Image (tube, rainbow, N blue to C red):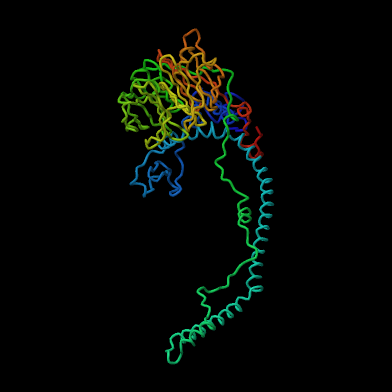
Amino acid sequence: MDTASSTYSTHKCSKCPGDTEYHCVSCPCDLCPQCKENHVKDLQTIDHDVVSHRDKINYIPTQEVCVRHPSHVYTKYCESCQVPVCFHCRKHRTHRQLDVKTAYKTKQQQHRGTIHTIRSEALFYRPVLLPRIKTDFKTCHTEFSLYQSEMLTKAQTLKNLINKVRKDFMKNVFCDFDFKHRCLKQMIEMSRHIVSLQEYELRYVQPEFTFSALQFLSSIKTALPQIHLTLHTSQLSMTESLNKEDVMESLSAIQITERGNRRVGNQCLLKLTSGAEFHQSLTLTGVGGCYHISCVTSDRVWVSDDGNNFMLTDTTGVPLHRVKDLCSGYGLHTVNSESELIYIDRKYNINKLSKDMKTTTTFNERTDFTWKPRCVYWSPSTGDLLVGMYNNDTKTGKVTRYNQSGQLTQTIQNHNTGMGLYRKPNYITENNNGDVVVSDFHYVSGAVVVTERGGRHRFSYTGHPSGSGLEPCGICTDVLSHILVCDVITKTVQMLDRDGQFLSHLLISPSGRFSPRSLSYDVNTHRLWVGLPYTNTVVIYRYITRQDALTDEHTPRRDEEALSSSTPAV
């Protein structure tokens, strides 16, 4: 066969003339390396399942030679040692072993989330981080040169001070001050003094027949010794001392400040689109309305109605799990970083459901029966649990904060003037700056009440134009620190900045058919989940996208990476 004239078929990328190395299962389409990187970074396709072309055809090489027994190939995988083994690897025979293909698929699934994060997030930051690192390197070199010069000056000053003190000490002790001579002189004087005292004592005790009274009186009148009760000792001193302030200034003027991990601000990476874009609509089975949503992953959410129906579902709308002891209400549940569900049960205890949904524990048991928990939110920044409470007797509300051990650490209840802040908290969330954001409504009065993390009141939003009225329901914040709130009166989703200024109506009801009631923002895909009250429908929108300069960034191919190590600045 003439190989020179043979024709070979190659798979081409679906988006450009490049050769295929990857396959998107979600689209589906074939992708070259560059198009694959753009595909996983685009927020519209960020959650797509992109695999290598080898995985697409399910090709798993099984004829790999054992490094310990070259005449045999790997057929099993030792779970205990986490290494592939062949038939003659005797020390692994007592361990649990899996088929190589099964182990490969299992490990691949376990690391799927990590690989997705690397592809869609970590690699996306590279065009921003690298130029900043290069800039910081130049700045560091310049600043360090200045610090180095200052350090040398300070060191010389300190050296001069030490030399001055040393010289002064040597001069006083060994030149100006004849310490040995003074000690000898004092010893002679003391000996003479002791002799005079002995003579005086001898005269005092002499009998009368040898030493008359007149003689004694005459003697003490002229020879009474001066009795010194204190001894004079010489002291070492320095004419000039080392100034403590000068030393401290020399040692502490230059400080090294510890810094945290390098981060990229979201404002550099993301921006608002011209308007909200429809992404997907879900029809759920088993709920009468969607009054609250808690995102678990990009494709799994907990949804509840205003009754006791509460379920976990995916993007198909099919129930995956149900919780039967949820109390009636609105913002009754949240999810922590471990994908554990935290919710309020029918006895108004706060429970925690494990990630595998097999174990339910009581996080906080209700002991004060004058207050009922109404809404909960787990804080990603602190790990604390924020709880909106309501007192039916006083018709007032408050917010309590619990640490990860379930201990009460803070209560936010009153305005700076002493007046109550809340009427009836229905939903609660937290902004990126630590502000506690509450959707507060009772009968005819409603507001979005925002306090600092410490509890000081920042502002209360009551509608647009200001004071026009607001009946707030579902509420959330996004990665750009916007506050999004559902308004029952206008049937809109309103967007505020972090300081409470109205920005826009993000979603508007078309002819009254759209009445948003609950919101949940997915920080991974930057999508907004919107629940409708009287139907079993959840609608997903996109209103945030990545900066054009970053999404258009050209990624060099493998052969180009060897030729270039620089990344264009943003």
Q: Residue 149 versus residue 135: which sits nearer the camera? A: 149
- Give the position of the C terminus as an image quadrant: top right
409 vs 49, left or right, is left
214 vs 350, left or right, is right
Q: Residue 256 versus residue 237: which sits nearer the camera? A: 237
- Give the position of the N terminus as an image quadrant: top right
Residue 492 lies, in percent from the top left, at 50, 14
- Residue 367 at least partly seen: yes
Task: Note whether 566 is above or below 217 in the view shown.
Answer: above
Residue drawn at x 38%, y 26% as measured from the top left: 389
Residue 42 lies, in percent from the top left, at 56, 26
In the picture as drawn, the residue positioned furthest to the top comes out as: 511
Residue 416 lies, in percent from the top left, at 48, 28
The quadrant where residue 556 appears: top right
Residue 296 lies, in percent from the top left, at 43, 28
- Residue 49 at least partly seen: no
